[in-house]
Amino acid sequence: NAKHSHEIIFTKGTTESINLIATTFGRSMLEAGDEIILSHMEHHSNIVPWQIICEQIGANIKVVPVNDNGELDIDAFKNLISNKTKIVALAHVSNAIGTINPIEKCIEIAHQYGVPVLIDGAQAAAHRTVDVQALDCDFYVFSSHKLYGPTGVGVLYGKTEWLERL
């Protein structure tokens, strides 16, 4: 029995999936002064769409720093999240340094504040077993070519409650 109903939407890839969430979430859920949390290790495809929506809406991006070991600073993450935070968007695995982020802990912390979490799984999907229901993430995105599938096909997993709101 799943805790939440969920849906899979097929897209052209990870970037299109993130763009779709950033655009629809931004236009329907964000207001001036709201905050989005990203990390210093995000791929540009998980930065630029949020920058664009922030410019349009007047929201702000807060960035989780990375420690000397190339890991997310969880204490800093806890200090960044607030009642102004409307979404967290993090990479499951860094495309540049290979860090496997503690997304389970980040999702748990974000959900304590009622904040949805988008996970960029582009680098993780082919190398890790990913159970989106166990993770309890609200969105999870990846591209099929990372799984040795065809190019131009991606997946956007989302909890039905969020997809219907968007």
Image (cartoon, rainbow, N blue to C red):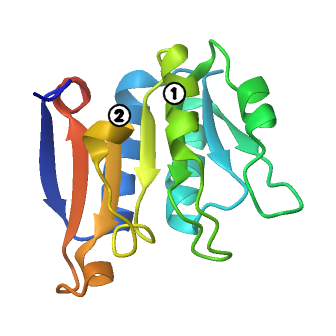
Does any portion of residue 13 appear in the rendered image? yes
Cα gap from disc 1 to disc 2, whole angstroms: 8 Å
Circle 2 residue = 136
Going 48% across and 21% down the picture, which residue do you hit?
Answer: 111
Q: In the image, 89: left or right of 7?
A: right
Q: Secondary structure at mark 1?
A: helix
Going 80% across and 49% down the picture, which residue do you hit?
Answer: 65
Q: Are marks 1 and 2 in contact (CB under 8 Å)?
A: yes
| The image quarter in which residue 82 lies | top right
Q: In the image, 72: left or right of 38?
A: right
Amino acid type at image mark 2: Asp
Going 72% across and 50% down the picture, which residue do you hit?
Answer: 72
Q: Is residue 114 above or below residue 43?
A: above
Circle 1 residue = 108
- In the rendering, at what x and y percent does residue 66 appear? 80, 54
Sequence-wise first label, 1 or 2: 1
Binning the other alpha carbons within 10 Å of mark 2 as few (below 14), some (14 to 19) or many (20 upward) gives: some
- In the rendering, at what x and y percent does residue 86 appear? 52, 24
| Mark carried by residue 7 | none
